[in-house]
Amino acid sequence: MIDKQQAQPLTAGLTPNRGVQQISPYVQGQSSISGVAEPIKLSSNESSFGPSPEALRAYETAGTEMHRYADGRQTALRQAIGEVHGLDPDRILCGNGSDELIQMVVRAFVSAGDEALLSENGFVMANIHCLSQGAELVLAPETNHRVDVSNLLSRVTDKTRFCTIANPNNPTGTYLNGSEMRRLRDGLPESCVLLIDNAYAEYVLAEDYEDGIAMVDEYPNVVMTRTFSKIYGLPALRIGWAYAPPDIVDYVNRIRTPFNTNGPALAAAAAAIRDQAFAEKLRNHNHQALKTITAALSAIGIEVIPSVANFYLMRFDPASGRSGTEADQFLQSRGIIPRPAGGSDQYLRITVGTDDENAAVIEALTDYMAS
Ligand SMILES: Cc1ncc(COP(=O)(O)O)c(C=O)c1O
């Protein structure tokens, strides 16, 4: 993804900014298989269940107003989020996906020559946004597929201005508990923004998990991002939100374009977050499904990294003669699309789907392991 080589000069003699020259384009999860009309797409951690019916209705109603600019202050959605989570709407920002919020925080707080402290397997778009600001990436190795706070803190310097942790992490699905996240925050300089990327927070049932809200309330340098792309089933609408201290809200708002989120998306997201019964059903389904999948795959010799998110990373032991790359091909021959991940061909990531989709995955992997 990150190409350290200098880019070739462009034909027109243009020179992209130095940071951008180091970036290779983001590669989206595969969405089709040639010759398969309706593949089981489990490559992008989407919800196979789609959005709440309430969100669909709100989207359709708002569509009749598409000849008007949407409310650039995003008032109704910020209010809905505030009511559901007990937060001050003035401390909430909405973005064109949480990805845009991450980008805006980086643009507002990271300058050329700063260091951005990241975990080796974090969400790759954070790396891209930091590079494009001219920052140096400082990557800390993980231990046993988990973010390692000690490894991060041992890499702090007086240039560290930004640190982000996806919690749960992608592609591992593992998480840092509240005390580990606080130890990280306490070891960072006060001049460093800690962005807790909680794209999968709504799936987590672990008791020692903290969703980041209390930390944002306690510390002026902590910001948390969330998304409507996962449990709320609205990735095509591109809506995320951030909860942040007043100064961070202020500076991000200065660079936020006036209409960065569109009207039907804002309306659908407000309806989606108010339907917590729908989200709870999916959270419980995901929890049960992860247990079933983990038991079934472990029984056939596939290591499943313990996940609290809506996806799981599998490791194929090279000693078994199996690999993630081969498993990927085998699954695709059965019409199932997983996602290569984890930085080596020992690994493969799959989204938790419906019970039928998960059963198809287990059946295909059972056949692969026996083949
Ligand atoms: C960890 C993590 N953060 C952020 C995002 C971005 O989500 P979105 O921009 O759709 O809100 C993703 C998307 O997959 C993700 O996995």
Image (cartoon, rainbow, N blue to C red):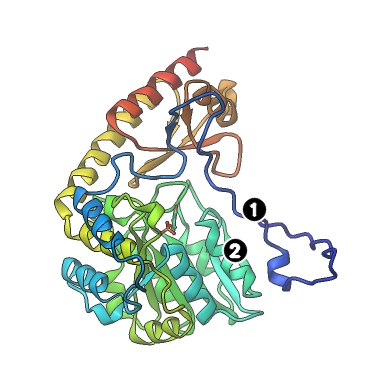
Mark 2 lies on residue: 128
User: Position of 157 compared to 61: left or right?
Assistant: right
Q: Point out the tag, 1 or 2, that comes first from the N-terminus.
A: 1
Q: In the rendered view, would you say 76 is above or below 126?
A: below
User: Position of 108 compared to 308: left or right?
Assistant: right
Q: In the rendered view, would you say 113 is above or below 211?
A: below
Q: Residue 288 versus residue 107: which sits nearer the camera?
A: 107
| Residue count near mark 1 (Cα–Cα under 10 Å), binned few <14, some 14–19, many ≥20 | few
| Residue count near mark 2 (Cα–Cα under 10 Å), binned few <14, some 14–19, many ≥20 | many
Q: Secondary structure at mark 2?
A: helix
Q: Residue at x 30, y 26 (%)?
A: 356
Mark 1 lies on residue: 1
Q: Ligand 1: which quarter?
A: bottom left
Is residue 319 in sight in this rendering? yes
Q: Residue 69 versus residue 44: which sits nearer the camera?
A: 69
User: Position of 24 compared to 227: left or right?
Assistant: right
Separation (CA) of disc 1 from disc 2:
9 Å
Is residue 136 in sight in this rendering? no
Q: Position of residue 317 (x, y in %)?
A: 54, 28
Amino acid tagged 1:
Met
Q: Residue at x 16, y 70 (%)?
A: 83
Q: Which residue occupies the extreme top position in the image?
A: 371
